[in-house]
Amino acid sequence: MSQKRMLIEYADATPEVQKIYDDIMATRGTDWINNFWKVLTHDPATLRRIWSNVKDVMGPGELDSLTKELLYVAVSASNSCHYCTASHSAAARNRGMTEKQYSELIAIVGLANETNRLAAALAVDIDDRFL
Amino acid sequence: MSQKRMLIEYADATPEVQKIYDDIMATRGTDWINNFWKVLTHDPATLRRIWSNVKDVMGPGELDSLTKELLYVAVSASNSCHYCTASHSAAARNRGMTEKQYSELIAIVGLANETNRLAAALAVDIDDRFL
Amino acid sequence: MSQKRMLIEYADATPEVQKIYDDIMATRGTDWINNFWKVLTHDPATLRRIWSNVKDVMGPGELDSLTKELLYVAVSASNSCHYCTASHSAAARNRGMTEKQYSELIAIVGLANETNRLAAALAVDIDDRFL
Amino acid sequence: MSQKRMLIEYADATPEVQKIYDDIMATRGTDWINNFWKVLTHDPATLRRIWSNVKDVMGPGELDSLTKELLYVAVSASNSCHYCTASHSAAARNRGMTEKQYSELIAIVGLANETNRLAAALAVDIDDRFL
Amino acid sequence: MSQKRMLIEYADATPEVQKIYDDIMATRGTDWINNFWKVLTHDPATLRRIWSNVKDVMGPGELDSLTKELLYVAVSASNSCHYCTASHSAAARNRGMTEKQYSELIAIVGLANETNRLAAALAVDIDDRFL
Amino acid sequence: MSQKRMLIEYADATPEVQKIYDDIMATRGTDWINNFWKVLTHDPATLRRIWSNVKDVMGPGELDSLTKELLYVAVSASNSCHYCTASHSAAARNRGMTEKQYSELIAIVGLANETNRLAAALAVDIDDRFL
């Protein structure tokens, strides 16, 4: 029994899962499903739940959809999640992110990780004005 | 001997440090210095180096200054750095971040941390289209 | 000189190391040694120390051995440690973990990582009742 | 404007939020709401979404409810989330976790964090049998 | 029932624990026990195990004892563990660490956290010469 | 469009970048450039900035250059950054790190990650003597 789960393709999915795949493609305006969902599908309840969360959180709001993807990339890169950095930077490029913007984003991720440790190591007290 | 270093106020700083404090306030359009810098000042070389990095990375670029602060907040919140989340969310508010936008940002930080672990735990292979 | 250390197989190990390998196999009821130990063996003192810790911590206690393995998998998955997730989920399956239980575990790991960041980002005070 | 958000008590909540508070208390068999939810309430959509996830993931399944809480505590402790460790270890105690079991859990969290780094630092390849 | 465990002082400890406390003080050449051990004591088996590990790992070796403490501080600061940074930087100061050295160490911790994320985000392949 | 950026070799670099490559090799006393810099070069401003930081932080100070590399390796290994552990342990070996010292370092990284979680999970208060 393998730790690595097979990808469940559209043709092999249950009608219930196909409906979720359809919603993912329709919401994103694409004609394919990326591997993350094809693996999650082994547990249809989790597939449904996570997709519902992503659709909710990444859907229309006060932050525009490019900014939302940039934030997702930044957290994923900070966590060294290779898959999520790849998939969400592709999504950000589809929404117009330039290579120069990507470089600026990565620079912020790096610098924030540096100053986050400095602030913690030096046990800096929060300024009254920030409270 | 204390792990916690005293804050070095402007009046007590060397002329060299005062020049950096002046540059921080001028660049940010504020009339005060937050604790992070007042603690870093115990090591003037690091103060100078980190400020130079922050000025560079957070200065004008292809990403606007609000987006840059949002990204800084997102990484800091993801790293559970309380000080940096407080200081950079204050900076983001000064650049127009609304409470609704802050809530959306925090929701993305939470969700990305969830899916980052799912992708890693399930060892999802990166799609060819992302490479 | 390589960062990657060769695997030290039973036949090539010193008698001292063979005795530890024997104890690992006897304790686990298996007839093979996984790579983690074969790499650690380059530093026999660390091999001995870590095995002694694992034997102690994962041995009989008030938590049953399946629950202990589930906890090990959860921490490893949360830390995105691919090797440890693979080896301890294999151990958990040997103790009866079903695929459905594994899915539930992974879902908890994901969700906890989400709410951990929300609690930190929002600086929630601990309730008196919890203290 | 403060980073720290006020707690929104039942009496001050909207009817919509009161219904969620009621569901939290009914589901958990308690007569009070912990601070996490009272802070999340500032963003009712996130309150509703996160509660729905927690109810789903932590509800009846193949893992019993004590094991689920133990897993939640383990991840939270591994992430050094003080609030979540406090709240979920309280929940685990309510479901019967003994102090001895808590000690065993904490020991596993510590040890897993140690061996996770050893496995990564030594770049151990995953055994074929685990794949 | 509190998440926070009382400190178990020498006078209130069992003879078995007092012997470990004695060994800690003798090994370190001090006449007091820091809080970490006084809390661990609630689980005497873990107290004994962790102390045995610390004594082993931090004892005489090819790295001198100051360097070992510096490494411990660096990892603790990188993990934002306030307690461990405080206790091990005190130990490092006792072994001669200067404030200037501490500043250099913190700078390395910050910078490594920055470049660690850059290397991961940019998916840099390991050079053949490093393998 | 690929997430993975090509390596920019010396011969293909702009004169501006070649000058930085020359400085890296001169400072390190080597005749080649490792992949990290060849990837960073896609964003020359970041290449210049990060190299300037590394040169500064890792240059002569009160900590000797071997100790500095050991600290860099420790943080990188603790963060599970495979590339940085490989490149900085190569640098440490060049400065005289023995395999035995590397094993001791890795053991400290592992143990610190264990006790960091214990201290956080048990919410140990910092001793007055450390403040």
Image (cartoon, coloured by chain):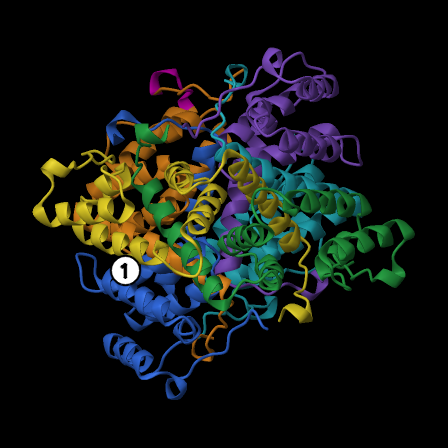
Chain colours: A yellow, B green, C orange, D blue, E cyan, F purple
Q: Quadrant of the C terminus of chain A?
A: bottom right
- x%, y% of residue C43? 50, 27
Amino acid identity at mark 1: Lys
Question: Farthest residue in the left direction?
Answer: A15
Judged left or right of residue C96, residue C109 is right
Q: Nearer the viewer, residue E14 or B127?
A: B127
Can you say whether D19 is above or below F63 in the image? below
Residue E106 place in picture, x, y as percent: 69, 45
Q: At 59% across and 30% down in the image, what residue appears?
A: F43
Chain letter of the residue carrying label 1: D
Magenta residues span C10-15
Residue in view at x 39 percent, y 25 percent: C38
Q: Is residue D23 left or right of residue E75?
A: left
Residue placed under numbered mark 1 in the picture: D68
Considering the numbered disc 1 on the image, is that residue within a helix, a strand or a loop?
helix
Q: Position of residue A122 (x, y in %)?
A: 69, 55
**Which of the two residues, A78 or B120, is positioned nearer the viewer here?**
A78
Label 1 crowd bin: few (<14), some (14–19), many (20+), radius 10 Å: many
Residue E15 placed where, x, y %?
Answer: 53, 62
> Foreground: B32 or F91?
B32
